[in-house]
Image (spheres, helix red, strand yellow):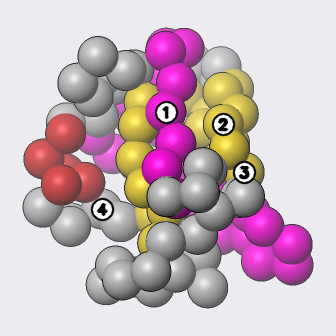
Amino acid sequence: MRCHHWTVAGTLYAASGGGSVVSGATVRLIGSDEQIVDVATGPDGSFSSLEAVASPALALVSRCPETRIFDVTSGTCNRCHDGSMPLWLP
């Protein structure tokens, strides 16, 4: 996967349709090669990494007491920017 100059980047939202962001959460990405990359969301809900993550991947998103699992089928920037693959955590 690759997004802009990062290998992984995104924003964690509080609802599937977007809206407010979630800060202080952990995003664990598990690539198809079983490589694990852990990142945290910042104050603006964003996260990024320069570590490689093989696509497709799983994203385990958590902030106590909630955890959600997402299939990340593509690292293409537009999959997230067009809203078709949002990461969210209530």
| Residue designated by label 3 | 26
Q: Which amino acid is tagged 3?
A: Thr
Callout 2: SS: strand
> Residue at the spot x=72%, y=51% of the render?
26
Q: Answer left or right for 74 relative to 52.
A: left
| Residue designated by label 4 | 85
Residue 84, horizontal then vertical, whole percent: 21, 66
Question: Main structural element of the magenta stretch: helix, strand or loop?
Answer: strand
Q: CA distance from mark 3 to mark 2?
A: 6 Å
Given this view, does label 3 or label 4 mark the residue nearer the observer? 3
**Mark 3 or 2 closer to N-term?**
3
The one of 38 and 36 positioned closer to us in this rendering:
38
> Residue at the spot x=42%, y=30% of the render?
8
| Residue designated by label 1 | 48
Q: Are marks 1 and 4 in contact (CB under 8 Å)?
A: no
Given this view, does label 4 or label 2 mark the residue nearer the observer? 2
Q: CA distance from mark 3 to mark 4?
A: 18 Å
Task: Tell me where the magenta segment starts and ends, as one range.
Answer: 45-74
Callout 3: SS: strand
| Residue designated by label 2 | 39
Q: Are marks 2 and 1 in contact (CB under 8 Å)?
A: yes
The one of 8 and 44 positioned closer to us in this rendering:
44
Q: What is the crowding at mark 3: few (fewer than 14 residues within 10 Å), some, or many (at least 20)? A: many
Q: CA distance from mark 2 to mark 1?
A: 7 Å
Q: CA distance from mark 4 to mark 2?
A: 18 Å
> Residue at the spot x=72%, y=58% of the render?
24
Q: Which amino acid is tagged 2?
A: Val
